[in-house]
Image (cartoon, rainbow, N blue to C red):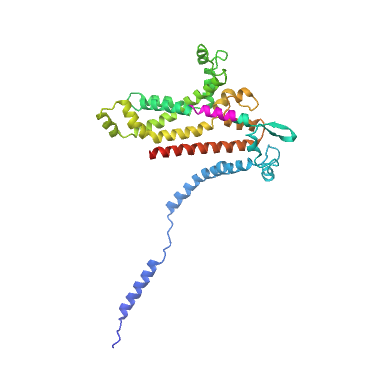
Amino acid sequence: MEEQVIPAEQTADTTADLEAEALAAAPQKRRINRAVLSENLWGWFFVCFLVIGTTLFIYFAFVLSVWLSFVDYRGNGTLWEALGEGNSSGAFYWYQYMFSNTMPGYFGSVAPGGIANFGTTLLNTIFYLIGIPVGMALSLFFAALMSRDIKGSGVFRVIYYIPTVASTVSVALLWQNLFGGSTTGGAGGTMVQLFGANFITGDRWMRMLTVLILTTWKGLGGSILLLCAGMNGVNESHKEAASIDGANAWTTFWRISLPQLWPTIFYCIVTSFIGGMQIFAEPDLLYGNGVSDASVMEVTPFVGLIYGNYYTTRYYSYCSALGIILMIIILLLTLVQFWLDSRRDKV
């Protein structure tokens, strides 16, 4: 057999092709886009402040608070010494204390337990949560009116939203001066007293009702604004079809608008509940705060119990334990709300 001879030119072309394929297959060094790099660096520069602040004042503070609840820290000595020494009375001393009538206190004395104040303040907070369904019903009513094609509805949206963005201190002082009664010069209080009632200086339930009305009124604007935006997203073709079928305005709202508004309503309920469980400023500004004052404790919410112990008894570890319990209550009840919402979607 004759040996096949490959021309030199073909061999050179084949070698060049193989080298080109090898170069193409080899990883190419990525060129740096200076514009994209500069944009990313500036983005991380502005985000880093939020990341650092969130890490220090939320995540780190949460871990520190959990640790603090298992030790004995009352402001005497450094915090790091207390974290290292623990609690000689037991790691769960403060959690037992808040659910007890009496427990051995410090320096060999017997301190009153925290169950009375714990239960009273928690019930007060639950009472204040009544404002959530009331405020939601009022928000739906006003949002339905403002969503109609009525002249000047935008002005009313601004008016109703003003209390939401106003300072809580200024609103509380305004409320106190308005409903303080004749002795403090409150015109609204004087008018209410004509019917035998007294908001600011009345009994426990009248004072709690004052806080309830104040918080409901102040939070009304935010819910109205969100619901107005949600109503603008309701499918108009569904409304037109219902109108053609003979549905009146109430039936159209109940059967068409309300189901499509449920995501917005659910968001308002959850956020209002979380905020309501942490209510503190309004009753504190109206009536003060103090764990040793029985008349004040009658209207003090759960967060007020935490701040009251912080400023009066200086039991910092006890305050941390109360905060952890509050977090667990909010978490569990929020999970229940999401569970009920998921069951609603399956029906």
Q: Which quadrant holds the C terminus?
A: top left
What residue occupies the far bottom of the structure in this picture?
A: 1
Expressed as whole percent of the image width and height from the top left, the position of residue 231 reads: 35, 32
Q: Residue at x 44, y 30 (%)?
A: 222
Q: Picture quarter containing residue 181? A: top right
Expressed as whole percent of the image width and height from the top left, the position of residue 35 reads: 42, 51
What number of labels is visible?
A: 0
Expressed as whole percent of the image width and height from the top left, the position of residue 275 reads: 51, 33
Along the line of sight, the residue nearer the viewer: 53 or 339: 339
What residue occupies the far left of the structure in this picture?
A: 244
Q: Residue at x 63, y 24 (%)?
A: 294
Q: Residue at x 58, y 37 (%)?
A: 325
> Is residue 264 highlighted in magenta?
no
What residue occupies the far right of the structure in this picture?
A: 108
Q: Is residue 123 above or below residue 50?
A: above
Expressed as whole percent of the image width and height from the top left, the position of residue 340 reads: 44, 37
Along the line of sight, the residue nearer the viewer: 185 or 204: 204
> Is residue 120 highlighted in magenta?
yes
Magenta stretch?
Answer: 119-130
Q: Which quadrant holds the N terminus?
A: bottom left
Q: Is residue 174 left or right of residue 318?
A: left
Along the line of sight, the residue nearer the viewer: 309 or 286: 309
**Which SS does the magenta portion mostly show?**
helix
Along the line of sight, the residue nearer the viewer: 255 or 139: 255
Q: Is residue 214 above or below residue 16?
A: above
What residue occupies the far front of the structure in this picture?
A: 347
